[in-house]
Image: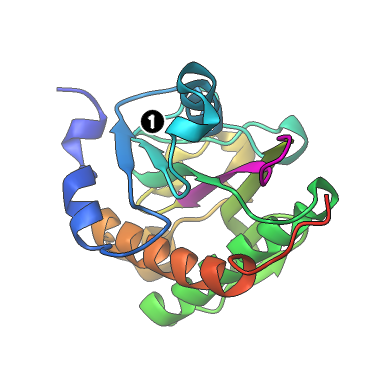
Amino acid sequence: MSTAEKFDRLIPDQLKAELPSTVIGREIIVLEQTGSTNDAISRIVSRHGPSSVVEGFVVFAEHQTAGRGQYGNRWESTAGKGLWFSILLQPRIPLRHSGRLTIWAIETISDVIRKEFRLEPVIKFPNDVQLCGRKVAGVLVEMRAQENAPHLAVVGIGININQCRDDFPVGLQARAISFAMALGRQIDRQKFAVAILRNLDLTYREKFSNSVCSC
């Protein structure tokens, strides 16, 4: 049995069933392991072509071996204990405005944390969400230009869910936190994943669906 199998597993069909009529989450896959979900989704697009992959396609991984954050920093992705995923989007915004996607994602994540757990997260720009002064979530946005079509954006999100202190490397133990550590109990990852995707979908459509791209 792999490390991830010892924990609650993400089930893509069940996730999709909870997200009818959404853009984000209309297609979902869960990988057992990958380097990073941003790279995985980019490989899928390169292999099949942008037109064959629907907007809102989500790739989760139970474990990332080379997860990364801002400025190439490594993101520690303990198997089966967090949410590590990327979303393919086609926002009608110029490449220079990609920061709007980061702000949208971290604000939405913060709002869901407040609603679900009654915790008070703090946004640390440019791309982190903190609890108790320690990092609980991060966002990495990568955009690719397209001719005569909205640019592609891959929005990578990492959220610490059920780690204990010892799951983090020694150098990060004073700077990282999970919901389980903050609340003193384990969290249903599947349920939280649905809440995150549902709210990302709602706020994405509010903020970006009708944007006009002057690329």
Q: Position of residue 35 (x, y in %)?
A: 49, 22
- Find the residue positioned furthest to the front: 148
Q: Position of residue 77 (x, y in %)?
A: 46, 36
Instruction: Report the front residue among 56 and 185.
Output: 56
User: The magenta stretch spans which residues?
Assistant: 146-159
- Examine the rendered structure and indicate whether residue 158 appears above or below residue 62: below
Q: Position of residue 139 (x, y in %)?
A: 62, 50
Q: Taking the image as drawn, is residue 80 in sight? A: no
Which residue bears the numbered disc 1?
Answer: 63
Amino acid, disc 1:
His
Q: Position of residue 21 (x, y in %)?
A: 30, 65
Q: Quadrant of the N terminus?
A: top left
Give residue 180's quadrant in the image: bottom left
Give residue 208's quadrant in the image: bottom right
Instruction: Report the front residue among 58 and 157.
Output: 58
Residue ID at (22%, 63%): 18
Instruction: Report the front residue among 171 and 187.
Output: 187
Give residue 12's quadrant in the image: top left
Q: Secondary structure at mark 1?
A: loop
- Examine the rendered structure and indicate whether residue 176 appears above or below residue 74: below
Q: Is residue 55 left or right of residue 134?
A: left
Is residue 165 highlighted in magenta?
A: no
Instruction: Report the front residue among 201 and 192.
Output: 201
Residue ID at (35%, 67%): 195
